[in-house]
Image (tube, rainbow, N blue to C red):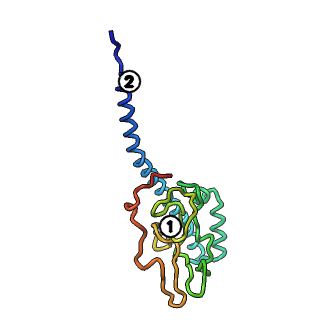
Amino acid sequence: MRGYGFTLKQLLVVLVIIAALAALLFPVVQIVRYRVLEAKCRANLWTIYMKYKLIRMQNNDRWDEEAIKEFRMWRLSPEGLKVIKCPLSGEYYGIIANDHDPRKPYLIGGDEIALYMRDNLVAMCYCHTRPPRPRCGVPYVGGACVLMVLDIGDGNIEYGFDFYTKDQRTQKIIWPREGEKCPDPRWFPDVSKGY
């Protein structure tokens, strides 16, 4: 008399179906994970912006050496240490309000073309870019679309270009051109490699 149980073929068919479902769901899970970590990153950038705004208000809307020193001290406090790293990669944010002298807006200057930091830029995440990079450890190339917080109104968190080039003679912005935006993320749906 034959016992009740599954045959080897039936077990293999079930395993193949499970493997196929896992292969179909893996990219979806990775995209959801990326979006959740992006939301955490946005929250961290918002916290940095709120502290920047608070220090600026306490300093009569000035951003001078004293305010920068207070901001640096906050960055090293337990509260600041919780939010100064990207949750996706663990890399530190580029905090312009801390590292950049507002009296010298250019990064690289020449006779004809100069490279300037974006106006009103407070902090940016080098890891969240458009299009998404395969790994956050890849060296950062300037001029990419990065997640940033801008000191516009009540704070504006968006993807944008971190700096621009300007013709020194005509004072016209060369790149990015007026109205140029970051690529639409739907054009680059494959964030499953490396995230």
Residue found at x 66% / y 74%: 66
Query: Taking 33 as reference, is 116 left or right?
Result: right
Give the residue type that dot 2 points to: Leu
Query: Taking 14 as reference, is 83 left or right?
Result: right
Numbered disc 2: secondary structure: helix
**Could you tell me residue 49's position as x and y percent?**
53, 67
Residue found at x 52% / y 80%: 165
Numbered disc 1: secondary structure: strand
Q: Nearer the viewer, mark 1 or mark 2?
A: 2
**Could you tell me residue 60's position as x and y percent?**
58, 77
Q: Quadrant of residue 67?
A: bottom right
The image shows residue 48, relative to residue 57, as above or below, that is above
- Farthest-out residue, left: 1
Tell me which label, 1 or 2, sits earlier in the chain. Answer: 2
Q: CA distance from mark 1 to mark 2?
A: 55 Å
- Farthest-out residue, front: 9
Give the residue type that dot 1 points to: Met
Q: Quadrant of the N terminus?
A: top left
Residue found at x 45% / y 55%: 191
Question: Which residue is disc 2 drawn over?
Answer: 8
The image shows residue 45, relative to residue 121, as above or below, that is above
- Farthest-out residue, bottom: 169
**Could you tell me residue 46's position as x and y percent?**
50, 63
Residue 148 disc label: 1
**Could you tell me residue 110's position as x and y percent?**
60, 84
